[in-house]
């Protein structure tokens, strides 16, 4: 049997458990939080007072924190790219509406709330040049991304396991920093989004665990492939008006590093967490090529740490067009 057909067979086997997985990792729609619950109610007598409070508290937040919050929002708003990418993965049949396509649609529905909520909050804050932010969002959706997974479900689930954990960290840290400035509303917003991301990360890591049990050698080779390429974030093509693809991604990353929202050390910590969760060091049943792949991924965290210790984050702030005043 070809590698492609084995992957499809593995996906079909996991799909048999999809009703259980949907119930375990996604919430019923009517029980889930919605953006309207976390924003001022336009029908309330306190509506304008609450907006004034949002705008006053926004003045207490530093420049880099605003840059990261806006960049995180743009990343969330590029959701159409992520849904279309996952729908193209081998084993996901949207036309036949199989269990995997139901997962992708339901996951997308939960993720869609994040961008909606953050976008409205930024609009109310009075600190954001919304047109410039919207231009960056449109560019990001138009430009797409290149994460090196192709249609391979093994590589895609390695990526999503890693990326969802990274997103969890970023939103959680922004929420913590917002709380320190007295911004309880924004802290709660980021905390709820972060919790969603953590739940989604558990789901994708569970998919990978199941694949390791059925096809350990090929899953290990996929893991090695993704770590050799390095996990790039979904907004790595981010840009502003008049700039080329990816021109401001580095500036956004520098801002996140400066305020310790997401750092190289976090990348390494996520990697180590996944090595432990998937029990890579104790895995059996690997062929010779996969054993070498396992050796590579087990040794990689220390190599990355050595590189990180020699890397300094630029101290100079970049002036983003997104930030109004």
Image (cartoon, rainbow, N blue to C red):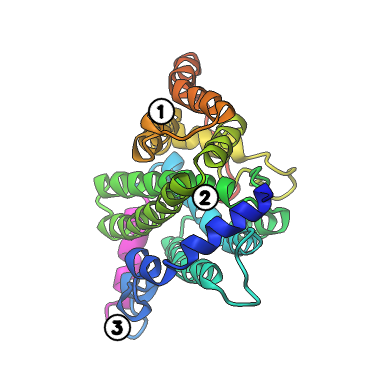
Label number found at residue 44: 3
Between 74 and 58, which is closer to the camera in this rendering? 74
For the stretch drawn in magenta, what is the main secondary structure?
helix
Q: Which residue is mark 1?
A: 265
Task: Assign a secondary structure to mark 1.
Answer: helix
- Disc 2 residue crowd, few under 14, some 14–19, many 20+, Cα 10 Å: many
- Which residue is painted at 30% across and 77% down in the image? 31
Which residue matches tag 2?
A: 157
Graded by Cα atoms within 10 Å as few (under 14), some (14 to 19) or many (20 or more), the crowding at tag 3 reads: few
Q: Earlier in the sequence, mark 1 or mark 2?
A: 2
Residue 270 picture location, percent across and down: 40, 36
The image quadrant that residue 184 belongs to is bottom left
Q: Is residue 243 visible?
A: yes
* Closest to the observer, 126 or 170: 170
Between 225 and 306, the one lying in front of the other is: 225
User: Residue at the location (42% across, 64% down)?
Assistant: 121
The secondary element bearing badge 2 is classed as helix
What's the magenta region? Answer: 44-59
Residue 241 in picture, x, y percent from top left: 70, 50
Callout 1: few (<14), some (14-19), or many (20+) C-alpha neighbours within 10 Å?
A: some
How many angstroms separate mark 1 from mark 2 (CA)?
A: 22 Å
Visible in this render: residue 145?
Answer: no
Disc 2 and disc 3: Cα gap in Å? Answer: 44 Å
Locate residue 242 relative to residue 112 in the image: left or right: right
Q: Earlier in the sequence, mark 1 or mark 3?
A: 3
Tags 1 and 3 touching, CB below 8 Å: no
Number of the label disc, if any, that sits on residue 325: none
Residue 249 at x, y = what percent? 60, 40
Q: Quadrant of residue 35?
A: bottom left
Q: Is residue 70 above or below residue 289?
A: below
Q: Nearer the viewer, mark 2 or mark 3?
A: 2
């Amino acid at each position: 049997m070809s590698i492609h057909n084995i992957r499809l067979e593995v996906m079909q086997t996991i799909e048999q458990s999809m009703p259980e997985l949907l119930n375990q990792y996604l919430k019923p729609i009517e029980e889930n939080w919605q953006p309207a619950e976390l924003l001022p109610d336009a029908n309330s007598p306190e509506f304008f007072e609450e907006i004034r409070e949002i705008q006053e508290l926004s003045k207490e937040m530093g420049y880099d924190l605003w840059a990261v919050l806006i960049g995180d929002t743009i990343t969330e708003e590029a959701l159409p790219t992520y849904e279309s990418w996952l729908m193209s993965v081998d084993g996901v049949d949207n036309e036949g509406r199989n269990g995997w396509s139901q997962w992708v649609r339901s996951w997308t529905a939960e993720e869609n709330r994040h961008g909606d909520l953050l976008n409205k909050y930024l609009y109310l804050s009075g600190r954001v040049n919304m047109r410039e932010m919207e231009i960056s969002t449109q560019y990001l959706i138009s430009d797409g991304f290149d994460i090196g997974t192709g249609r391979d479900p093994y590589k895609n689930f390695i990526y999503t396991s890693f990326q969802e954990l990274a997103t969890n960290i970023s939103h959680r840290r922004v929420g913590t920093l917002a709380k320190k400035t007295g911004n309880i509303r924004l802290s709660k917003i980021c905390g709820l989004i972060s919790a969603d991301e953590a739940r989604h990360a558990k789901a994708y890591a569970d998919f990978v665990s199941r694949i390791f049990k059925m096809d350990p050698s090929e899953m290990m080779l996929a893991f090695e492939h993704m770590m050799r390429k390095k996990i790039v974030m979904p907004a790595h093509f981010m840009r502003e008006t008049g700039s080329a693809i990816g021109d401001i991604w580095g500036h956004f990353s520098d801002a996140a590093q400066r305020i310790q929202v997401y750092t190289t050390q976090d990348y390494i910590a996520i990697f180590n967490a996944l090595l432990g969760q998937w029990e890579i060091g104790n895995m059996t049943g690997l062929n010779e090529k996969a054993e070498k792949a396992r050796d590579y991924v087990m040794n990689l965290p220390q190599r990355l740490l050595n590189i990180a210790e020699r890397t300094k984050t630029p101290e100079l702030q970049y002036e983003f067009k997104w930030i109004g005043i």
